[in-house]
Amino acid sequence: MTKIYHTDWGGNRQIYTEANKPNIEGLIEHELKNHEFGEKIQSFAGWTPHYQFEEAGFKLEKKVDLLRIGKPVKRIKNGAFQVNVEGVIEITPEDEQYGRANAGTKGILRTPENKLLLRNEYERLNNSQIPFVVFRTYRGWPAIWDSVYFFSQGEFKG
């Protein structure tokens, strides 16, 4: 197991190892190891450290979107246009309300579809003996998302 650290403030969002971590308060600790399905997943509300992991050379193994609605950009009829990876989609006000109410909840983690997606990724990485960092990021307003990221060491050297 390797411990990885990062900060969550200002322009100093960097990834550190045990060997090069600064002596500052507020470092967030992750473990690069084989995690078990059902372990508590570290969560970040309103922001995501995935950019720092990518910039540091970690390999994104999988991003599991538990909930992805996006950010409303234009209202039409009884729905809303949203911006997503797939482009612009239309959702109903009920979809938007569901997203705002459920982003970051335990319930969204426990839906049968999401449990299966997460279990499959844990099993794939563990069966391949790939140590990984796992964390969850979510936001309920103005953009709406809830995602779990799986990163392996990739090119990260620390």
Image (spheres, rainbow, N blue to C red):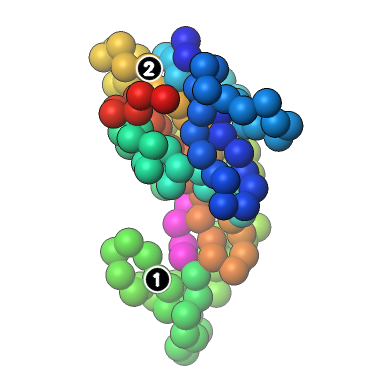
Q: CA distance from mark 2 to mark 1?
A: 33 Å
Q: Residue at x 64, y 48 (%)?
A: 9
Q: Is residue 61 visible?
A: no
Q: 40 above or below 86?
A: above
Position of the C terminus by quadrant: top left
Was residue 128 drawn as part of the magenta stretch in this picture? no
* Magenta-highlighted residues: 66-70
Number of other residues with Cα within 10 Å of mark 2, as a class: few under 14, some 14 to 19, many 20 or more:
some
Q: What residue does disc 1 label?
A: 83
Type of amino acid at the residue the image marks with label 1: Val
Pick the front one: 46 or 111: 46
Residue 99 % position (x, y): 56, 59
Name which quarter of the figure residue 90 lies in.
bottom left
Q: Is residue 137 left or right of residue 9?
A: left
Mark 2 or mark 1: name the one nearer the start of the chain.
1
Residue situated furthest left in the rendering: 128
141 up-or-down from 116: above or below: below
Front residue of 46 and 96: 46
The residue sitting at 26% across, 14% down in the picture is 128
Measuring 46% from the left and 63% from the top, which residue is drawn there? 69
Can residue 133 be seen here? The reply is yes
- Pair 2/1: label in front: 2
Measured from the top left, where is residue 150 in percent x and y? Answer: 40, 32
Which residue is denoted by mark 2 in the rendering?
131
